[in-house]
Image (tube, rainbow, N blue to C red):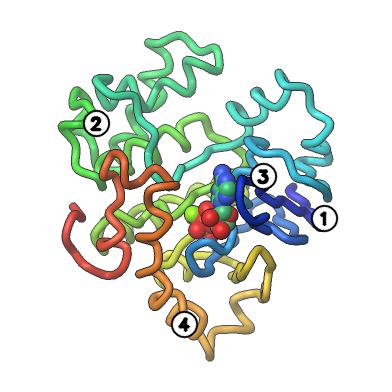
Amino acid sequence: MLELEHVVKHYRGAGEEVRAVDGVSLRLAAGERLALHGPSGSGKTTLLLLVAALLAPDSGSIRFQGRDLGRLSTGEAADYLHRDVGFVYQSPQLMARVPALENAALKLVLGGMGAGAAQERVRPWLSRVGLDGSLRRTPEQLSAGERQRVAIARALAGEPALVLADEPTGTLDSARSHEIVRLLHDYARDRAAAVLLVTHDLEAAAIADRRCTLRDGRLVDGHPRRHTQSGEGHDTDRDDHDAGRDSQSAGRDGQGAGGVIRSSARAGGRDGRD
Ligand code: ADP
Ligand code: MG
């Protein structure tokens, strides 16, 4: 379903070149769940943006259902992002002053569905993420975790074949986190969808068929879970130490701006979680 061949993406700013993604090859089959982890700055978000066709690689190819994303027209790339991909961004990217129901429905509306039909479609998803009582609340009336759950409902409601989730449980307490991880698991199973899940959360990673680690833009392992169960956790232990460094990149990720995900919460504190 998804094939990456030696994908490279370097950022060239005023200063030094950053080798954000540096020759990544991987395959993801329909119904497969891959958990990706790695320290802050290792290229996880960049990799998801490339797979969503929101960034173009410098070299290498990304194929989705046999189609080379690099050959899509702008319109086709937009259709791919709207129809085939459900993206749960690292910060929820909701419209300010728009209630949760309309916010979650917006992606379907932009994809051409009528507003009423789109809202009926997202309602059960908002219910599945536990937001039945919050449909009329705007982002500023929701907690960070609730905002993230609106974004998850928005991503899944269109029933995408590929779910890209960038630390979707980062602002959730462990019970909610468990529910969301289950939801992603069941979603992949029931719809034969592929899920690429960036996570520091051991439990979230445990729903995956495979776990990979990204380090300095390179995939350093990618073993099936059945081969790693005896050593479960050793990679992630390392990540927990790295999580504290997220504060350095929080501003660039846009998390600082809305206070949507607090780096202290991701570093292990409970403050700010709902
Ligand atoms: P992660 O999600 O693993 O924290 P990112 O993909 O956000 O990693 O970033 C990978 C590297 O690329 C980091 O060194 C980061 O600072 C850099 N980077 C990310 N986005 C940009 C950008 N738009 N411009 C310049 N450098 C960037
Ligand atoms: Mg990131």
Amino acid at circle 1: Glu
Label 3 element class: helix
Specify the label residue 267 is tagged with: none
Q: What residue lies at 19% left-to-right and 42% top-to-bottom?
A: 143
Label 2 element class: helix
Ligand 1 closer than 8 Å to label 4 CB: no
Separation of marks 3 and 2 at Cα, in angstroms: 27 Å
What x and y, as percent, mark residue 273? 20, 55
Q: For mark 3, what is the residue?
A: 51
Q: Earlier in the sequence, mark 4 or mark 2?
A: 2
Q: For mark 2, what is the residue?
A: 139
Asked whether the beta carbons under mark 3 and mark 2 sit within 8 Å of each other, the answer is: no
Separation of marks 4 and 1 at Cα, in angstroms: 28 Å
Drawn side of residue 78 relative to residue 88, left or right: right
Q: Earlier in the sequence, mark 1 or mark 2?
A: 1
Residue 164: in sight, yes or no? yes
Label 4 element class: loop
- State which mark lies toward you, 4 or 3: 3
Separation of marks 1 and 3 at Cα, in angstroms: 12 Å
Q: For mark 1, what is the residue?
A: 5
Above or below, 21 relative to 120? below
Drawn side of residue 242 relative to residue 159, left or right: left
Q: Earlier in the sequence, mark 1 or mark 3?
A: 1
Drawn side of residue 206 relative to residue 53, left or right: left
Label 1 element class: strand
